Image (cartoon, grey):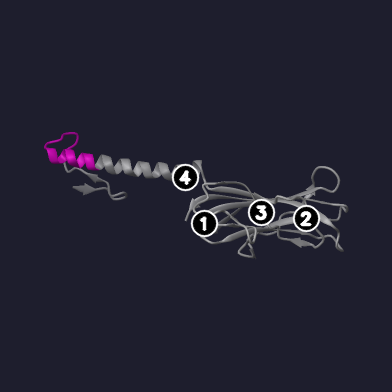
Amino acid sequence: MKTTETYGFPYPECDPPLVKDSSQISQLRALAVAVDEEVERVVNVAERDLIHPAAARFAIATLPVVASGTLESPVFDTTVYSINWGPSPALVPVTGGVRISTPGWYLIGCHALVTSATAAVLPMVRITLNGAAASSWSAVAGNYGVGNGRLASLSAVPLSLVEGDIIRMEIQHVAAGAPVWDYRPHLWAVRLVDA
């Protein structure tokens, strides 16, 4: 019996479309089974990666968080949703970050609604990976809503991550002095492809 180069599918050694003996029937059956298994594998990968990818979003339960420094790293304590994430929970309670349980390529995003009594508080956000910057700072946030509300966001940062990596976000503003400000952050992750 011969096999195809790319997938190694078995195929009969006969003069198609004629089947000359019963051994060729079993060879055709082997080909059909191999093709069926490969199609099922591809459908399962598409289902997992394209139709129902692992996704999670996190927030903080008691809002707003009040701050007076210029740099904050929110400790997330609430899973808004977590779908198909894997064997371990996505949220790490101690550090408030996102734990990666399956290696692969991910899109990570975040945003923070920041308000302050002073218009000088102009926030920016960024993503961190295991404590180090994994993105540049976002653009300075523009006005959002009423008063001095500002929404800083990063919509999608692609990262290649391994099991055990921890994703967090940071919020920074560049106002002089130490104005009081508060924030309402969200962080999300979607796995694009397994490694």
2 or 4: tag closer to the N-terminus: 4
Which residue position holds label 1?
101
Q: Is residue 117 left or right of residue 189?
A: right
Q: Is residue 24 left or right of residue 31?
A: left
1 or 4: tag closer to the N-terminus: 4
The part of the chain drawn in magenta is 15-30
Callout 3 amino acid: Asp
Report how far apart the C-alphas of labels 2 and 1 lie in the structure: 31 Å
Callout 4 amino acid: Arg
Callout 1 amino acid: Ser
Report how far apart the C-alphas of labels 2 and 3 lie in the structure: 22 Å
Report how far apart the C-alphas of labels 4 and 3 lie in the structure: 27 Å
Callout 2 amino acid: Pro
**Residue drawn at (64%, 61%), measured in percent from left and top?**
95
The picture quadrant where one finds residue 19 is top left
1 or 3: tag closer to the N-terminus: 3
4 or 3: tag closer to the N-terminus: 4
Q: Select label 1 or label 4 by which is in front.
A: 1
Residue 43, image x, y percentages: 41, 41
Which residue position holds label 2?
123
Which residue position holds label 4?
48
